Image (spheres, rainbow, N blue to C red):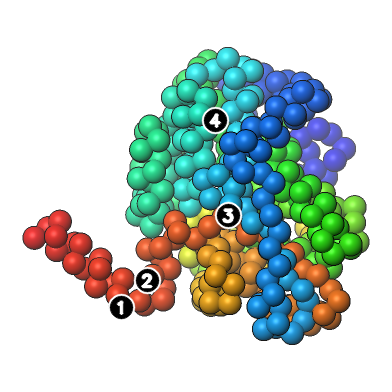
């Protein structure tokens, strides 16, 4: 990174003039907090007492024997409060909001986990809260919408554009422009204008810091490979950051959707469809047409259904430090089913992308090798999507009877 906010040409802060002062305030507050040892101590204390950190590593013995290859360990971010890694970022940003003296937070969400985490943080700190969510995601992540509203957040359904995550981000920025004095935008991933990529990856680095210490304590050596799903990139960067200088292969797994050849996917770095552009305030790889218009994306996992990717990951891809792969919806559902049956663990559909790629490769490694998978979230939020994908007749009958009750 030659200039703060840029990662070998990716990143930056492409902002309308009206937002510059607000971003300068946020950057100054973050840099002061980052260099204040008392701030990190306050942050880690809250995460320990409120959010159940450190989360454990789980040895997946049954899966390891099944593939007869590498020893598989799983970092259990599903045990973090609100069921995903998202709490790491929002609690950190909540402390910054307190420092800035603001009283309201807004956020975008796709899978709903970031929305629930932000609403939880707002309840904890006493902030007003508004969550923007695309109409498609509202429909497929209804349980999380329910909890956001119970936590006191106003959930605004976004019906513009493709009605998914990128459109929710656009609406959040529109809100922020008109409410800058009182409001902070809690961006959920390591994208957007500087300082968001640096700030989100800073808070999420607690994941990889823990995991590195834990695997060394358990096994006495580092893993051969680490797998993390990649939407915007927050959980992947959180896991990878403390291993960047180590002789460990880092594998980011994007949404292959219905296959890269179909065009119905969200693979910016692992396909030939991504190209460099500027949108939503930063420069990175986007799925866009020749005129720079954003394409529609598809993934079975709402949290990976995003048109851009972190500028930090774009840099790590070009430098070759991180290998990027894509797994299809069907491969993800199959990996989820196998993980449930073999280990009694229920990863989120987002996290299951990392499992799917790890399962493709586990047998090619020796039994002395270790692979580490980041289970970035739990799968109970995905019950409607998963039950539909499994074609579960009991669930279908349950939904039918419930519909008849409501409309009978």
Vertical side of 174 occupied by 228: above or below: below
Which residue has dot 1 on it? 393
Circle 2 SS class? helix
Residue 85 shown left or right of residue 162 in the figure: right
**Label 3–label 1 contact, CB within 8 A:** no
Q: Toward the viewer: 285 or 408? A: 408
Of marks 1 and 4, which one's residue comes earlier in the chain?
4
The label shown at residue 388 is: 2
Q: Position of residue 263 (x, y in %)?
A: 54, 69
- Number of residues whose C-alpha sits closer than 10 Å to that of mark 1, classed few (under 14), some (14–19) or many (20 or more): few
Residue 84 shown left or right of residue 39 in the figure: left
Q: Nearer the viewer, mark 4 or mark 3?
A: 3
Quadrant placement of the C terminus: bottom left
The image quadrant of residue 21 is top right
The image quadrant of residue 11 is top right
Instruction: State how far apart marks 2 and 3 are (Cα).
Output: 22 Å
Q: Position of residue 220 (x, y in %)?
A: 89, 62
Circle 1 SS class? helix
Circle 3 SS class? helix
- Number of residues whose C-alpha sits closer than 10 Å to that of mark 3, classed few (under 14), some (14–19) or many (20 or more): many
- Residue 184 visible to the viewer: yes
Q: Position of residue 309 (x, y in %)?
A: 65, 51
Q: Nearer the viewer, mark 1 or mark 4?
A: 1
Of marks 3 and 1, which one's residue comes earlier in the chain?
3
Instruction: State how far apart marks 3 and 1 are (Cα).
Output: 27 Å
Which residue has dot 4 on it? 185
Of marks 4 and 3, which one's residue comes earlier in the chain?
3
Which residue has dot 3 on it? 78
Q: Residue at x 48, y 23 (%)?
A: 126
């Amino acid at each position: 990174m030659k200039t703060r906010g840029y990662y070998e040409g990716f990143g930056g802060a492409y902002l309308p003039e009206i937002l510059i002062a607000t971003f300068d305030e946020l950057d100054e507050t973050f840099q002061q907090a980052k260099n204040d040892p008392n701030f990190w101590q306050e942050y880690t204390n809250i995460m320990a007492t409120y959010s159940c950190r450190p989360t454990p590593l789980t040895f997946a013995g049954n899966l390891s024997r099944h593939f007869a290859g590498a020893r598989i360990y799983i970092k259990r971010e599903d045990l973090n409060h609100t069921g995903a890694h998202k709490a790491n970022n929002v609690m950190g940003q909540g402390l910054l909001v307190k420092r800035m003296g603001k009283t309201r937070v807004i956020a975008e969400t796709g899978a709903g986990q970031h929305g629930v985490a932000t609403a939880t943080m707002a309840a904890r700190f006493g902030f007003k809260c508004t969550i923007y969510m695309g109409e498609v995601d509202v429909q497929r992540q209804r349980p999380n919408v329910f909890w956001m509203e119970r936590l006191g957040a106003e959930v605004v359904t976004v019906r513009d554009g493709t009605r998914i995550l990128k459109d929710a981000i656009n609406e959040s920025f529109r809100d922020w422009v008109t409410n800058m004095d009182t409001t902070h935008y809690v961006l959920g991933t390591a994208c957007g204008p500087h300082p968001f990529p640096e700030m989100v990856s800073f808070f999420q680095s607690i994941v990889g810091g823990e995991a590195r210490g834990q695997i060394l304590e358990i096994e006495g050596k580092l893993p051969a490979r680490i797998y993390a799903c990649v939407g915007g990139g927050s959980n992947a960067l959180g896991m990878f950051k403390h291993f960047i200088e180590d002789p460990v292969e880092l594998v980011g797994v994007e949404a292959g959707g219905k296959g890269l050849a179909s065009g119905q996917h969200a693979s910016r770095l692992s396909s030939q469809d991504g190209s460099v552009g500027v949108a939503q305030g930063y420069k990175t790889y986007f799925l866009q047409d020749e005129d720079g218009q954003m394409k529609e994306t598809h993934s079975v996992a709402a949290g990976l259904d995003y048109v851009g990717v972190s500028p930090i990951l774009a840099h790590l891809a070009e430098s070759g430090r991180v290998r990027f792969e894509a797994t299809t919806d069907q491969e993800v559902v199959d990996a989820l089913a196998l993980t449930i049956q073999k280990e009694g663990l229920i990863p989120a559909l987002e996290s299951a992308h990392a499992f799917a790629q790890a399962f493709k490769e586990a047998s090619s490694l020796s039994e002395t090798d270790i692979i580490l998978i980041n289970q970035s979230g739990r799968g109970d939020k995905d019950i409607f999507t998963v039950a539909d994908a499994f074609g579960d007749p009991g669930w279908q009958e349950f939904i039918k009877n419930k519909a008849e009750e409501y409309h009978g």
